[in-house]
Image: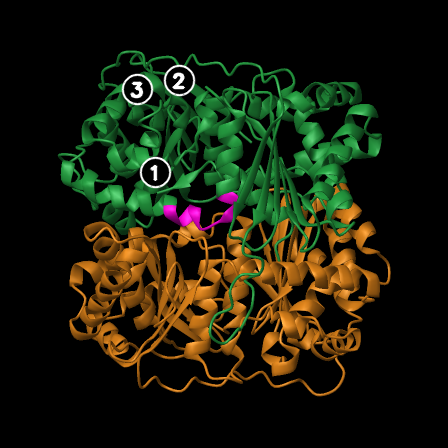
């Protein structure tokens, strides 16, 4: 197939101010999709300022040099454009979509938000109250509580992944406008930013427009270092049950600190994980824990390999009377994965899927933009998709076994359960 | 965009084809005209359960084999059940699309419904319901819906009542399948990188020999006119107060549909029309300004969707902590009165038209979106609405919008639900740590709403 992402198909430039731009011209739809990423985020929050990156970033649209929040909202609704921005732990992401004829307007709005936020007190306080209400609502969400406590078991205090980037009620309450302004001034830098544009645009014209909108953006001071430490290896089982009233089902998370995206074991673990808990309807986990044992509506695994080593974990929704049997079923599958090689049939099916389904993921502007953004973040190179089939086909059952053996244990895992449980565990 | 080609096979199977030759991908859908609206008490949830059984094997495709074949060929597949339809699709590299025809023609007639598979799926289906039960808004929504419809099957959620799921039999499931899975009750929609003539020829080869079935029983129940406001007061554990007002709504083929669509856009922005789409943020629309900007609610949503029979408009809001539901209710009713009492502005009307146009462009990015939008429109009205939708919107007048507001937003047409948390703040766990998965806004709530009646396998 003709890949939409190759060194020839993509125009990639870095402006004088350090901003990197990638453009893919796609004339088949009259829309344009934007994906931006800034290498900064919640990792810089201190224990007392948890949620700062998140609140400061969400506050950007609440008022800018040229636009009040209300004016910005009216502009989006008048044009049908979208613009969103939010901070994760490792990166700040912004994205948007518009008709090709509105691209200039979108850039004007985006640059106004990113470069010139004013943090108006009244609007920021409204936003803070909304976030606090959402935090409170999340405390009643079994899936959320299970994952949150899971991270606390998995990563030590002080590690960025010990918390979600959204912060805690008691810290978000106390964040100041000055802290938000400082965060913006320090971390919103063109030399940390990448912007991907995919749509019915010619690259030179698109780049000229972006340069007009964002070329004057300047980085000041030294580039902040971006480091997420490794989590210590697990040496025992840690389990936490979080009781929540009025619930019918528990959500659980069981797993390990995983690996970074640039770890050489990544591909073996990714293919192994696909077989373990993703392929088709949740892979082996789905076939056994869901289908054969009938213990869960959903049960799947995920390798959260980012700039830092996010969790490699199993997530499931289980009836409270089946919790222990479901855990046994999950552990049995983990044991199988780390003690026996996957079959050739399983391996080739996973490889066929990973290589064959590329076309579907690249069918829309959104799909191309997301893929391109990830390629850039992890420095995979614009020839990545051309190399990808060979990388995947090269993975062997022995490599998967070795990776599973290395990163998963049946006697050293973290387990978090939230819902109708008694909380004694 | 190229034209949509319609063909009708002798066995009653309708075929809609739309070549889209921008990427080497094709999507193939079969839509059955059966959903929870075809269910009677005792077998609620049966359509959705039948959908699950369609992955459990035929004499030539063992259980799980469909999935393996799709994986091997680099495709994706899924199925959905709603009030009005059950739909199946496969999206594949275009040179592999024959596989979809093989799978769908096979399970249209040959699904086994092995009793052991029915038994193990029962726990999965009940778990699916129990997962939804963890969400306070599910309980409130289910009760409001049940109160709003006394006799029409829109009374129950697509997932079905738990008591029915516990006792339904294999024979009931199989009977439901035999009754509704006939070519004369189905629509094929294919979109993507193929030649229409060739595709039609292949479809005839695979589906043409399937015999026409008896016409499925018509669903004749009509909901009697509501004579009085109905109220639900629900006290359960939960994190905050929730508000839900439901109004009987015009169906997709009602002349009031388009004025109501414009009205919905004025109140809350135009929702996403595509399979994967996100609507306009709607933060300059009336409800956000009246509820969220004023700090009464953290989110508000005006849910109106295309249905075969008259469905519901669901106006929902999440209260800010400490704000009594009386205030939320008063503010929402005031907005509905306002739109009934005074014409919308030209600027508001123009916003809705522009947002709808943009959403249409977004909805044609990718063949999966095209397959979805065509099938869904054909089920509730006609795929031909695809071409005329924007014209129909533009023909709406401001007076039409005011008229439908006056007609539908009356006390006797509404069911009001209040969710009052019984446990105050939720219990803290051992170390009292907190966090959130993300800031929800009115927009997120809107997308969740649109997907509500669609239950994923």
Residue A82 shown in magenta:
no
Q: Main secondary structure of the magenta part?
A: helix
- Give the chain coloured orange: A
Whether discs 3 and 1 lie on one chain: the answer is yes
Relative image position of residue B374 (x, y in whole percent): 49, 28
Q: Is residue A23 left or right of residue A297?
A: right
- Specify the segment rendered in magenta: B130-138
Residue that label 2 marks: B7
Q: Residue at x 43, y 32 (%)?
A: B82
**Residue at the right extreme of this rendering:** A66
Q: Is residue A20 left or right of residue A3?
A: right
Residue A413 or B23: which is nearer the viewer? A413
Instruction: Look at the numbered disc 1 and give the secondary structure of its residue.
Output: helix
Residue that label 3 marks: B183
Label 3 crowding class (10 Å Cα cut-off): few <14, some 14-19, many 20+? Answer: many
Residue B413 or B289: which is nearer the viewer? B413
Q: Which of marks 1 and 2 is nearer the N terminus?
A: 2
Would you place residue A192 above or below residue B169 in this image? below
Residue that label 1 marks: B162
Label 1 crowding class (10 Å Cα cut-off): few <14, some 14-19, many 20+? Answer: some
Q: Earlier in the sequence, mark 3 or mark 1?
A: 1
Q: Distance between the residues labelled 1 and 2?
A: 41 Å
What colour denotes chain B?
green
């Amino acid at each position: 197939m003709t890949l939409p992402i190759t060194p020839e198909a993509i125009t990639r430039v870095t402006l004088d101010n350090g901003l990197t731009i990638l453009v893919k011209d796609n004339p088949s739809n009259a829309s344009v999709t934007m994906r931006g990423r800034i290498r900064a985020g919640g990792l810089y929050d201190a224990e007392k300022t948890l949620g700062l990156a998140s609140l400061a970033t969400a506050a950007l649209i609440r008022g800018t040099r040229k636009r009040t929040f209300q004016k910005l909202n009216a502009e989006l609704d008048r044009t049908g454009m979208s613009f969103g921005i939010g901070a994760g732990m490792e990166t700040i992401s912004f994205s948007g979509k518009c008709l090709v004829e509105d691209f200039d307007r979108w850039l004007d709005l985006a640059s106004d938000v990113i470069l010139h936020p004013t943090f108006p007190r009244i609007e920021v306080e409204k936003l803070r109250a909304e976030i606090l209400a959402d935090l409170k609502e999340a405390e009643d969400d079994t899936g959320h509580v299970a994952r949150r406590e899971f991270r606390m078991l998995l990563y030590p205090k002080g590690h960025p992944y010990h918390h979600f980037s959204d912060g805690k009620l008691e810290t978000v309450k106390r964040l100041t406008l000055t802290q938000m302004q400082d965060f913006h001034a320090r971390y919103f830098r063109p030399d940390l930013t990448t912007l991907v544009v995919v749509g019915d645009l010619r690259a030179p014209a698109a780049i000229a427009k972006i340069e007009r909108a964002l070329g004057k953006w300047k980085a000041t001071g030294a580039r902040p270092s971006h480091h997420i430490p490794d989590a210590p290896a697990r040496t025992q089982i840690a389990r936490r049950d979080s009781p929540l009233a009025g619930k019918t089902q528990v959500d659980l998370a069981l797993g390990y600190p995983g690996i970074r995206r640039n770890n050489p074991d990544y591909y073996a673990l990714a293919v192994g994980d696909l077989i373990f808990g993703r392929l088709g309807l949740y892979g082996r986990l789905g076939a056994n824990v869901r289908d054969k044992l009938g213990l869960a509506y959903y049960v799947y695994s995920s390798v959260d390999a980012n700039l830092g080593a996010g969790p490699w974990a199993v997530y499931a929704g289980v009836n409270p009377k089946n919790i222990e049997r479901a855990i046994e079923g999950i552990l049995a599958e983990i044991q199988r994965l780390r003690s026996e090689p996957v079959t050739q049939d399983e391996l080739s099916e996973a490889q066929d899927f990973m290589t064959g389904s590329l076309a579907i993921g690249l069918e829309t502007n959104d799909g191309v933009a997301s893929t391109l953004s990830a390629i850039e973040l992890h420095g995979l190179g614009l020839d990545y998709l051309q190399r990808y089939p060979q990388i995947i086909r090269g993975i062997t059952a022995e490599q998967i076994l070795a990776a599973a053996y290395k990163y998963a244990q049946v006697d050293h895992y973290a387990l978090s359960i939230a819902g109708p449980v008694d909380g004694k565990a | 965009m190229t034209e949509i080609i319609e063909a009708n096979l002798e066995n009653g199977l309708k075929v809609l084809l739309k070549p889209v030759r921008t990427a080497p991908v094709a999507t193939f859908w079969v839509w059955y005209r059966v959903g929870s609206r075809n269910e009677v008490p005792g077998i609620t949830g049966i359509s959705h359960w039948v959908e699950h059984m369609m992955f459990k094997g035929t004499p030539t495709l063992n259980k799980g084999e469909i999935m393996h074949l799709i994986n091997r060929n680099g495709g994706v597949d899924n199925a959905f059940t709603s009030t009005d339809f059950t739909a199946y699709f496969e999206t594949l590299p275009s040179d592999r699309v024959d596989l979809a025809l093989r799978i769908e023609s096979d399970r249209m007639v040959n699904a086994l419904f092995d009793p052991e598979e029915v038994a193990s799926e029962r726990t999965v289906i009940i778990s699916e319901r129990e997962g939804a039960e963890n969400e306070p808004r599910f309980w409130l929504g289910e009760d409001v819906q049940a109160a709003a419809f006394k006799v029409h099957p829109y009374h129950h959620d697509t997932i079905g009542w738990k008591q029915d799921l516990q006792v339904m039999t294999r024979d009931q499931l199989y009977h439901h399948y035999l009754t509704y899975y006939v070519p004369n009750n189905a629509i094929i929609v294919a979109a993507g990188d193929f030649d229409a003539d060739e595709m039609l020829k292949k479809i005839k080869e695979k589906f043409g020999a399937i015999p026409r079935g008896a016409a499925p029983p018509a669903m004749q129940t009509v909901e009697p006119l509501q004579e009085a406001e109905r109220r639900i007061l629900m006290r359960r554990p939960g994190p905050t107060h929730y508000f839900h007002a439901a109004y009987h709504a015009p169906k997709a083929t009602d002349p009031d549909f388009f004025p109501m669509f414009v009205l919905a856009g004025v109140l809350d922005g135009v929702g996403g029309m595509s399979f994967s789409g996100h609507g306009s943020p709607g933060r300059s629309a009336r409800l956000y300004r009246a509820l969220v900007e004023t700090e009464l609610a953290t989110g508000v949503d005006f849910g109106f969707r295309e249905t075969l029979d008259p469905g519901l408009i669901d106006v929902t809001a999440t209260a800010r902590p400490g704000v009594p539901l009386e205030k939320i209710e008063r503010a929402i009713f005031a907005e509905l009165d306002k739109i009934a009492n005074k014409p919308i502005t030209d600027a508001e009307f123009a916003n809705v038209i522009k947002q709808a146009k943009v959403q249409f462009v977004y909805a044609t990015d990718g063949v999966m979106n095209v397959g979805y939008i065509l099938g869904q429109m054909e089920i509730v009205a006609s795929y031909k609405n695809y071409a005329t939708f924007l014209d129909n919107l533009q023909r709406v007048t401001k007076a039409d919008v005011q008229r439908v507001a006056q007609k539908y937003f009356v006390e006797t047409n509404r069911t009001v639900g209040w969710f009052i948390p019984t446990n105050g703040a939720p219990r803290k766990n051992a170390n009292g740590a907190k966090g959130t998965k993300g800031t929800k806004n009115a927009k997120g709530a809107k997308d969740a709403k649109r997907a509500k009646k669609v239950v994923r396998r």
